[in-house]
Amino acid sequence: MGTVRVRCRLFARYAEVTGEEVVEVTVPAPATVADVVRQLRAQVAQGHHLPEHPLVARNREHALPRDAVADGDELALLPPLAGG
Amino acid sequence: MGTSSRYCRRSPGARRVTFVSRGPIAIEDLVAHVASPVRGATAIFLGTVRAAPEDGAVSSIQYSGYEEMLEDELGRIVTEVETRWPGVAVAARHRLGDVPLGQASIAVAVGAGHRTDALDACRWVVEEAKRRLPVWKREIFRDGTTAWRDNADGRSPGEPVTLE
């Protein structure tokens, strides 16, 4: 039973509130998006200000909390979208 | 085989052109890209920075984004619209950085054989862009203060994230 190392990225107000833009998170395998978000919230300063169920993108595509993550994935937490 | 109908795509022998603009969007370039003798209709949408009374003294909006995903996602939207409306040509750009009042933050041009397809496809691209693109905006007020602003129609935490 190994671990999964994920590169988490934070943007806009999420980066502002935590003071972080990139955070490496390691969780036990197998792991889901929700597992990584839970660990990230516990790991970073002010992580409790991040929503428990944020919008997320895995490897640059919108993802669901139940989606599996693999070692080396990039997971982005997306604040409410405001394009256009 | 004709030239690609997609703006900002890597095609054989062509340099990659980005969906993202760091300066004013050249609308005429987008229009020229979708123009064709077989397309009788061109629909253009420009989303511009405005100062609505309820927004207070906004002087500009600062757009930031997850740029790598923005490129990919806008590319996926263009691919999807070309599948839904075969034969249309789409050109789209989103601007990042500080955008002054009155200037466009997003521009979409769609060329089609007839107006219905051009208008419908253009609207679809704009709605999907607002719903899916990883872009955030911070309003800059004349007094120097700032505030994050969400789209009323953008996706937010807690919303279903299922995509079509």
Image (spheres, coloured by chain):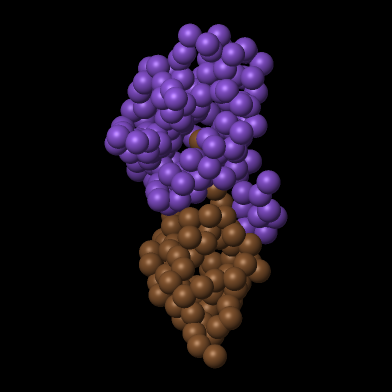
Chain colours: A brown, B purple
Say if residue A37 shows up in the picture: no
Looking at the picture, tell me which residue is in the foreground, A1 or A40.
Answer: A1
Where's residue B147, x and y in %? 46, 47
Residue B40's quadrant in the figure?
A: top right
Residue beneath the point at 50% across and 45% down: B73
Rendered position, B114 above or below B104: above
A4 vs B65: above or below: below
* Residue drawn at x 45%, y 15% as measured from the top left: B35
- Return the x and y of residue A26 as percentages of the image width and height: 46, 81
Along the viewing direction, whichever of A34 and B114 lies nearer the viewer: B114
Quarter of the figure with the N terminus of chain A: bottom right
Give the quadrant of residue B125. Answer: top right
Residue positioned 48% across, 55% down in the render: A60
B50 or B92, nearer to the observer:
B92
Q: Is residue A20 above or below residue B142?
A: below
Q: Residue at x 38, y 67 (%)?
A: A22
